[in-house]
Amino acid sequence: RQLDIERTVRRLIQREAEYGLPGSIKAPVFFLSAAVRAWAEGMPMDELERFTSVTPGDFVRALRLAVQLMRQVRQVLANLDAGDAGGG
């Protein structure tokens, strides 16, 4: 699954370059994935150190930023849907 994501991102970066767009796509970083999954499955925060070396504060900050990004994407998609529904 991670390899599929990385391949897709590489293709998107190539397309940006082909169309002369400024490089805005960043390659995904998966270093917190195992810790996030363990936490989501109920592992206590103080046991996550075996999955990552980031501090608990940095871990929480990364999750907060991810939530913020997801909210922004949701808002953009809602705006696109509203524009399409208006006769677009």
Image (cartoon, rainbow, N blue to C red):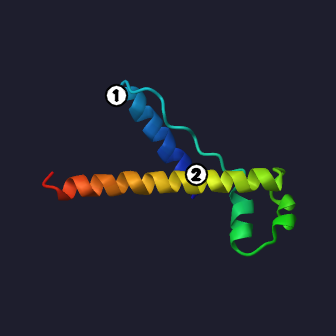
Q: Nearer the viewer, residue 78 or 17?
A: 78
Answer with mark 2 or mark 1, whichever residue precedes in sequence.
2
Q: Nearer the viewer, residue 24 or 64?
A: 64
Residue 12 is left or right of residue 27, and the answer is left
In 3D space, how far apart are the residues under numbered discs 2 and 1 (Cα atoms)? Answer: 24 Å
Instruction: Please say if 48 is above or below 79.
Output: below
Q: Are marks 2 and 1 in contact (CB under 8 Å)?
A: no
Hey, what amino acid is under mark 2?
A: Leu
Query: Residue 19's mark?
Result: 1
Residue 81, quarter of picture: bottom left
What is the total number of numbered labels drawn onto the structure image?
2
Frontmost of labels 2 and 1 is 1
Q: Name the residue rendered at 72%, 50% in the picture.
A: 31
- List x then y, in percent, for residue 7: 51, 45
Residue beneath label 2, please? 3
Q: Name the residue rendered at 50%, 39% in the picture.
A: 10
Label 2 crowd (10 A; few <14 / some 14-19 / many >=20): few
- List x then y, in percent, for residue 64: 64, 55
Label 1 crowd (10 A; few <14 / some 14-19 / many >=20): few
User: What element does badge 2 sit on?
Assistant: helix
- List x then y, in percent, for residue 77: 36, 55
Hey, what amino acid is under mark 1?
A: Tyr
Q: Nearer the viewer, residue 7 or 72?
A: 72
Q: Nearer the viewer, residue 56 or 24?
A: 56
